[in-house]
Amino acid sequence: MAKDTHISKAIAIAFVVLTISAIAGLITMIILYKAQISAMNPTPPPTVPSTTTVLPPTMRLPRSVIPESYEVFLRFPFYTKILEVVNVTSPNQTTNFSGNTTIHFQCVQRTSTIYIHSMELEVSEAKVFNRNTDGEIQVSSMSSHEDHSEFLVIELNEALESGGNYSLSLVFVGELYHNFDGAYISSYTEGVPSHEGDKSADRFLIITNNEPIYARNVFPCFDEPEMKAVFNVTIIHRRQTTALANAPVDKIQLIDDWKYTRFHSTPKMSTYLFAFAVSEFEATASSYEPVVIKTYARPEAVAAGHTKYAAEITGKILSFYENLFEIKYMQQKLDQIALPDLSPAAMENWGLITYQEGALLYEEGASSSLQKESIATIIAHELAHQWFGNLVTMKWWNQLFLKEGFATYISCFAVDHVEPSFNMKDSFFASELQAAFEVDSLTSSHPLVPPEEDIQRTYDIISLYDIITYSKGAIVLRMLEDVLEAPAFIQGIRMYLRDLSYANGDQNDLWHYMQKGADANNRQVDVAKFMDSWTKQIGYPVITINTTSGEISQKHFLFNDSSQSSLVWDVPIRVMSKTFLSPKPVFLKTSQPEIWDELISSSGDWLLANVNCTGYYRVNYNPENWEALLTQLETNRSLIPLMNRMQLIDDAFNLARAKIVNVTLALNVTRFLYNETDFHPWDSAMRNFQYIYLMFDRTEVYGPMQTYLRSQVRNLYMFFSNSTDHSQVPVDHMQQQSQTLAVQVACNSGLPDCVAMAKRMFGLWMKDNTNIIHPNLRHWIYCEAVASGGKEEWDFAWSQYQSTNDTSEKYHLRHALSCTKKIWLLNRYLGYTLDPEKIQQVDAAEIVSSISKSVAGQVLAWNFIRAHWDYLSHGGPAVLIHAVTSRFSTQFELQELERFAADYHLGSAERVVQQAIEQTRVNIQWVSEHKDVLLQWFERETAS
């Protein structure tokens, strides 16, 4: 039986109501439910004895039997709202469900043992039938191994014969929790409660989240991506609710208080894509023949038009992918549903895509342009999965980048198609590249495709859902397209998807089809050899170029250079100067220095490598070339491509962190920002200044650094202040991004004009309850107003948070509440995260991460995480650990972190904690070596 889990008092009441009101129709329900079980014995079976079955040598399922199809019946005796007040003696009720499944399978290797996954389910009966003879095969024993392999092991009295067709029928019960895995309960409030404690507006729904290995929590199944099958599903649920699943509805029967919803057969798919929802949600329909597209959400959100934007762009993105891949979308319908509670942001279930509300709902006049961009990107990402992941699936989880890297990369093209003003190919890859670089500069990173034998445990699998898989995966695919060029790349994709439809593949299959695309387009590249160096090895190289001698070399880039590494990559090098651009990349394939004549520059000229940042590597130059590049940036920056202006900043700062160049070089690169108005260079600079802030905001470096940033950002801030007075925003999307960043940097650095503007606008909102702050600027204006204010401003923001159901506004206010400088208010806010009535559990980790960004908040958050790790780790432990430890730079903090690693059950956070330990060691040494140099530089730059 599954372990007990606490849920809210409202859910407990609903459960008691359920047990009272269900009695009248229970006899009819039992008869009908048993009829669905068909050949299963309607009387309770005797207890099947457990055995000491020897498990297979790995955590993987044996390949002796292969599933073909499932018949799944699930019954949920659960109400979606409170019907009446019921006295409850215990607030810790749980909610159960029951079901049965019949699995049709083929035996491919003679065996008398069936291994199947089952977790947190009580399986009461198992029967096996020979479909060739219609005879039953007796079960001798059944044993569960939840603490080890999560296998249900079924021993038979006689062997299954190779080539035979069989069926396995199982009866089981399980429990619904509120933990975001498997089938779980989500809750929301419809409208505004009439008084504190009023539960009449509370609503509940049942939803699934089965990736990567949680379908086994819903029904016993062969829960591995290669074990694809067809699913035939019937859901028995309360009459007033609607059930959705992967496939369209086939038939609905209404009997008393119950609704039987039978769905059509799904395509052949992996278990992690199995999904359903039971709710009272409503939908916005959109037309895209012949696919029926519906976007579901809370009735209040649908009525307010918050699903309209998603409904408008979904069909356009589907059409784009169909034309790009030359394969039609494979189902008759596509449902999307916005959920109050979901971790992660979205899940690509075939035909029923689930989203966090903030990832799908857009409110005109309340949501920012950045949120609109995010919604479009996430929808495009999930729709890309309908091909990459759903139609063609990785063979095992170590190949996860085949779906996540591809969906991340391809989604940018789809967004550029439906929203060309977003300029996503530049914007997205700028952030993806720098995010991947940061993590991949540590020895505790991992290869994009780790060895299969290293990814066996549940924690191993979950830990792969990280920046390396998503961001590095996208970047190396972008690099491959640059090398092959688009026609060959797209041709390879089309063949890969066509030939492996409804099947599984690995990276070798992908390289095979990419090679065919390359050969057909006369591209002289050994694809497998080139890509294996980027997918099978940890990290990335730094390329060093001397423009005086023409020497070029590569070396593994690491923040901790004491780590010895002999790794070598096939590196595509493309260079440019004022008068020259390489027509195609040239490969550097050796660790030994080489002399390339084309890299020699005459005195005073500059040379730039990795043009437009299409390669996954950093570049360092001889001092003369760095000086020439800096001079060009300060005199006429437009001659250097925008993406390279961004990357020169990022490379210089990170080369300094690795002690390859002097930190003063990195700081000198930022001087040109005084006249820069484009978003990407500023964004890159602030990402990197953030590291210096975190290392030195507890020292005397902080003051001069703030003064320098105020002077640098003043021009950018005043440009938008003069043109819009911050009551309006520019028309151009990227200029809107620049304006938002200008407000962020100006207010954070204490520019008086910005601080006064934020206090004035927020004060007007408090005074007359009319919010004139543009949605683009609310995030940072709210933050500055709360930071500069006291209890009155904080309480006002909290009251606004409680009274709104708008997802975007809640996000801005959650962040603002963490900006206060009052320690007691931060402690109060941390306490609120433990109360689901105040803060949903899915948002708790985000809030603690935000609080940790300030000096005072970081100490509070670190203590809080350790005190409440079990609760907080459900909502994204990797982000939480990264945020709260990013300032660690003392021996005491290192010791505390090492003690945390030793004393706590970290689960999937194990790798990120090890990365934090490694980064803290690097920080300690870097701070001790660079504090005086930084202080002198900032004081000299701001002396006048």
Image: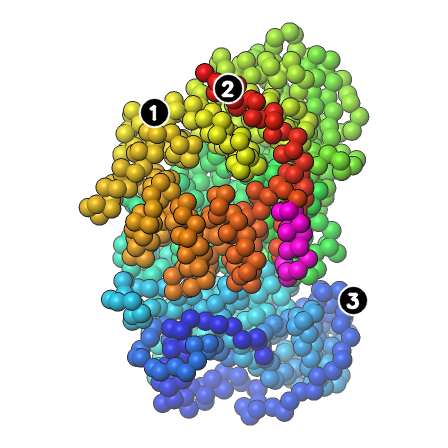
Q: Amino acid at mark 1?
A: Met
Q: Which quadrant of the figure contains the N terminus?
A: bottom right
Task: Locate residue 23: give its quadrant.
Answer: bottom left
- Residue 723 higher or lower than 538, as above or below: above
Residue 792 seen from this side? yes
- Residue 923 higher or lower than 76, as above or below: above
SS label for mark 1? helix
Is 347 positioned to the left or the right of 45 in the image?
A: left
- Asked whether residue 373 is drawn in magenta, I would say no
Closer to the camera in the image, 343 or 525: 343
SS label for mark 2? helix
Q: Tell which tag, 2 or 3, sits nearer the viewer.
A: 2
Say which label, 3 or 1, has the lower sequence index.
3
At label 1, counting other C-alpha atoms closer than 10 Å, the crowd grade (few under 14, some 14-19, many 20 or more) is some
- The location of residue 202, given as percent across then percent down, is 33, 68
Q: How is the image coloured?
A: rainbow
- The mark found on residue 57 in the picture is 3
Q: Tell which tag, 1 or 2, sits nearer the viewer.
A: 2
Report the span colored magenta: 892-906
Q: Residue at x 64, y 61 (%)?
A: 905
- The location of residue 709, given as percent across then percent down, is 46, 27
At label 2, counting other C-alpha atoms closer than 10 Å, the crowd grade (few under 14, some 14-19, many 20 or more) is some
Give the residue furthest to the left: 768
Closer to the camera in the image, 281 or 528: 281
Q: Amino acid at mark 2?
A: Glu
> What residue sits right under mark 1 in the picture?
718
> What residue sits right under mark 2 in the picture?
941
Report, in whole angstroms, how far the alpha carbon at label 3 lies from the one at label 1: 67 Å
Say which label, 2 or 3, has the lower sequence index.
3
- Residue 889 higher or lower than 151, as above or below: above
